[in-house]
Amino acid sequence: MSEDTITQLRDPSGFGADPLTDVLRDGARKLIEQAIQAELAELMASFSGEKLDDGRARLVRHGHLPER
């Protein structure tokens, strides 16, 4: 087997490592993050009037409000 050949495998994601792809991926990540933040803000607003028996908020965003 002195005549082995090594074949370079393609990137399984289907994307190359070019700068344009990196910019597009970063932009897509930011759009997804903004959509999730907007959905979370809507959910938090819908539960803003709900309180526990002791007066604490029923739903809080972990790490963003004072400890209950």
Image: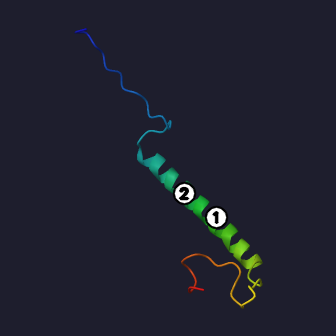
The reply to whether callout 2 and callout 1 are in contact (CB within 8 Å) is no
Find the distance from the CA under tag 2 to the CA under tag 1: 11 Å
Tell me: residue 67, above or below residue 19: below
Question: Which quadrant is the N terminus positioned in?
Answer: top left
Question: Which quadrant is the C terminus positioned in?
Answer: bottom right
Q: Which residue lies under the disc numbered 1? A: 36
Counting from the top left corner in percent of width and height, residue 24 is at: 52, 51
Three-letter amino acid code of the residue under disc 2: Arg
Determine crowd level at label 1: few under 14, some 14-19, many 20+ residues with C-alpha closer than 10 A: few
Secondary structure state at the residue bearing disc 1: helix
Residue at (72% x, 91% y) in the render: 55
Residue at (35% x, 21% y) in the render: 7
Counting from the top left corner in percent of width and height, residue 46 is at: 77, 76
Is residue 4 found left or right of 24 in the rendered image? left
Counting from the top left corner in percent of width and height, residue 43 is at: 72, 72
- Which of these two is toward me, 20 or 11? 11
Quarter of the image where one finds residue 57:
bottom right
Residue at the outermost front position: 53
- The disc placed on residue 2 is none
Q: Which residue lies under the disc numbered 2? A: 29
- Which of these two is toward me, 60 or 28? 60
Counting from the top left corner in percent of width and height, residue 26 is at: 50, 56
Residue at (56% x, 80% y) in the render: 64
